[in-house]
């Protein structure tokens, strides 16, 4: 019945299109409009049929491509090639998908549609991810990201974040994957992209599943199903049903697992999704094994193997043959186990051979591309020389060129001077920051403390103090040359500094670091040496060294949108107001605050997102409290990309 309905839809579409083409006759312009409308109708039908039958979707899109290639309309050509590339992607035919994606890129470049070029590059990254070529996938995702940044296409950033999350998920870096998925979800919600919201919930469900948080995972999957119900994307629905079935299987709820995976199988049979159908049959086989139904498991595995053979899916065959080998071993049917093991070895050998050939082809293509690029550069140079020779024949053109060049040079020089001024200011600030942390008074006191330990024969304490001082000095000198350092490096330098100060002072100074568990300290980059001057102010000007209950609290957390890193430095000293009064009486001015403010100004000048900064005397929050709270927020810098 379903097959009849699908065929009927296809026949009606073809009939309507045929009728449509016969109506528009007459002038050449009318014929052109008729063909254009027919192509658009074909393409819309192809997208619709993608959720009904992938084979028919490919067939009707091919009709559109044939008509479009006859009229050579770049707008229709680019759209046709892209749609067919997506069709073949879902059908599991990677080579055909590559072919049409590359054709689409050529047409979008003719149209100078950079956003569409970025989208197709992202789709090619998906193809490489499917083939487990993660380095190539990352390369195309980054090209996609750079294009979106160049044209300020913020609405498209969510899809790139989502793709990067998928890539890190496959490499089992769940923390980074979760961060990118959350960034993607936030972006999709901002632009009300229902389709991608459903996808983001699905991905977060997979993360929760990997972390064994099954209830949270099921909640995310149900949210994804709810969003997808607004769209009616049955292909994505099958993926969600499969995931829920897998989740129930992991929990040992085998009947529920079978129910959901069977529903996914029905959809994939209807769509002709061969890759997905093999996956569901293997999952049903695993459930049957858990139910100790060996014969049913064998049946599903053999059905999956037949599909893999018919569609030349060697990677699937290797996995299926391994499953069959283990099944027969468990049955003690060693003859069949041996035969399947032998076949699996042959398939793996073929896969290794294909991988080697593909790698050689990639290197050859890269060499040819480099060679072509050099030839193109040489031709461009020759062309430039010819243009210069022609230019010499016309003095007015030469004068105009000179004026333009001088104007351009003047603009460049002006921009360069402004840039040098900013760089000089940054360098001056770095020197001031270095001086605040490496001032002679601090070094003299530290060396005096070491000398005191040595004279008192406290060699262990002297060695400990000297090691911490060496580590601190090295860290400060290294970090002062960098624009950004990892959060972990900054915190370690800060701990070394506080430990040294504790050794100098007679009273015990307690300190604690409270770091949000969701923060990847190695991944996030921040400006170096921003927190240390405030810790020094707390110790010296806040009079903590004379406070028997001295305590410093340093808290690092993320905001709700996960795009700002929030620092809090809190002490129980005399408070900033009293510290200012004491400094005024001693005619001493702390430069830490002014340097910090200047650094924030420079950072905000260079960055699209601004850093926020605030110093609060705790008595204004609560009259019973005493001390100072320094708060500042830094836009998150992930892998060199500022969110």
Image: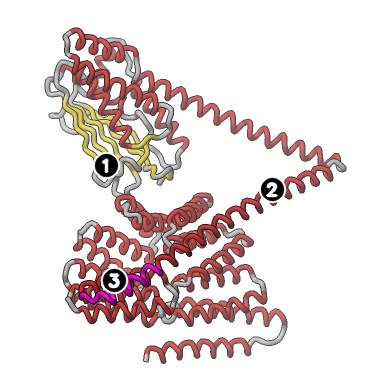
For image coordinates 65% across by 51% down, the residue present is 371
Q: Secondary structure at mark 1?
A: strand
Q: Is residue 538 left or right of residue 550?
A: right
The mark total stands at: 3
Q: Residue at x 78, y 44 (%)?
A: 385
Q: CA distance from mark 3 to mark 2?
A: 54 Å
Q: Which residue is mark 2?
A: 377
Residue 242 or residue 323, whichever sits in front: 323
- Precedes in sequence: disc 3 or disc 1: 3
Chain-order first, disc 2 or disc 1: 2
Separation of residues labelled 2 and 1 (CA atoms): 50 Å
Q: Residue at x 29, y 20 (%)?
A: 469
Chain part drawn in magenta? 331-347
The Cα atoms of the two marked residues, 3 and 1, are separated by 46 Å
Q: Residue at x 33, y 53 (%)?
A: 177
Left or right: where does residue 366 sit relative to residue 485? right
Q: Is residue 225 above or below residue 446?
A: below
Q: Give neighbour class at mark 1: few <14, some 14-19, many 20+ (Cα, 10 Å).
A: some
């Amino acid at each position: 019945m379903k097959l009849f309905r699908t065929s009927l839809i296809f026949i009606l579409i073809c009939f309507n299109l045929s009728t449509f083409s016969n109506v528009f006759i007459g002038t050449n312009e009318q014929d052109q409009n008729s063909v254009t409308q027919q192509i658009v109708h074909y393409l819309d039908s192809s997208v619709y049929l993608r959720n009904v039958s992938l084979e028919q979707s490919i067939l009707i899109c091919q009709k559109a491509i044939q008509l479009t290639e006859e009229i050579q309309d770049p707008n229709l050509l680019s759209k046709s090639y892209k749609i067919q590339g997506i069709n073949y992607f879902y059908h599991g035919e990677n080579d055909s998908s590559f072919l049409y994606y590359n054709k689409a890129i050529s047409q979008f470049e003719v149209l100078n549609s950079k956003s569409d070029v970025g989208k197709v590059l992202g789709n090619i990254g998906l193809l490489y991810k499917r083939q487990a070529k993660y380095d190539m996938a990352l390369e195309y995702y980054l090209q996609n990201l750079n294009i979106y940044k160049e044209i300020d296409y913020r609405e498209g950033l969510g899809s790139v974040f989502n793709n990067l999350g998928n890539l890190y998920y496959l490499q089992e870096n769940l923390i980074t994957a979760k961060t990118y998925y959350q960034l993607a979800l936030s972006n999709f919600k901002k632009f009300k992209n229902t389709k991608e919201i459903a996808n983001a919930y699905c991905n977060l469900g997979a993360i929760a599943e990997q972390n064994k948080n099954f209830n949270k995972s099921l909640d995310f999957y149900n949210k994804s199903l709810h969003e997808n119900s607004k769209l009616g994307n049955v292909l994505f629905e099958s993926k969600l049903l499969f995931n829920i079935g897998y989740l129930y299987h992991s929990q040992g709820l085998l009947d529920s697992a079978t129910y959901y995976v069977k529903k996914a199988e029905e959809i994939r049979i209807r769509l002709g999704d061969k890759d997905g159908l093999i996956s569901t049959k293997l999952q049903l086989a695993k459930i049957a094994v858990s139910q100790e139904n060996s014969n049913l498991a064998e049946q599903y595995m053999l059905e999956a193997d037949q599909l893999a053979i018919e569609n030349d899916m060697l990677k699937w065959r290797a996995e299926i043959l391994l499953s069959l080998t283990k099944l027969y071993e468990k049955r003690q049917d060693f003859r069949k186990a041996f035969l399947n093991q032998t076949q699996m070895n042959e398939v793996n050998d073929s896969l290794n051979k294909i991988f080697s050939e593909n790698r050689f082809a990639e290197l050859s293509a890269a060499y040819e591309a480099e060679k072509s690029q050099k030839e193109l550069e040489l031709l461009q140079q020759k062309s430039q020389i010819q243009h210069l020779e022609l230019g010499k024949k016309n003095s007015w053109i030469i004068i105009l060129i000179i004026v333009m060049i001088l104007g351009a040079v003047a603009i460049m020089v002006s921009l360069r001077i402004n840039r040098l001024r900013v760089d000089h200011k940054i360098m001056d600030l770095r020197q001031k920051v270095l001086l605040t942390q490496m001032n002679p008074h601090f070094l003299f006191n530290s060396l005096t403390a070491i000398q005191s330990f040595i004279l008192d024969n406290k060699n262990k304490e002297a060695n400990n103090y000297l090691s911490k001082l060496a580590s601190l000095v090295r860290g400060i000198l290294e970090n002062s040359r960098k624009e950004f350092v990892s959060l972990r490096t900054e915190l370690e330098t800060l701990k070394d500094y506080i430990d040294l100060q504790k050794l100098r002072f007679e009273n015990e100074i307690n300190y604690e670091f409270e770091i949000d568990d969701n923060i990847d300290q190695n991944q996030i980059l921040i400006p170096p040496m921003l927190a240390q001057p405030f810790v020094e102010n707390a110790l010296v000007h806040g009079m903590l060294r004379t406070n028997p209950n001295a305590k410093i609290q340093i808290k690092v957390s993320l905001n709700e949108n996960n795009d700002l890193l929030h620092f809090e430095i809190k002490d129980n000293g005399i408070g900033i107001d009293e510290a200012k009064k004491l400094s005024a009486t001693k005619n001493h001015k702390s430069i830490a605050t002014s340097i910090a403010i200047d650094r924030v100004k420079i950072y905000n000048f260079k960055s699209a997102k601004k850093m926020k900064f605030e110093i609060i005397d705790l008595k204004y929050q609560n009259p019973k409290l005493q001390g100072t709270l320094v708060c500042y927020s830094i836009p998150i810098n992930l892998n060199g990309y500022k969110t």
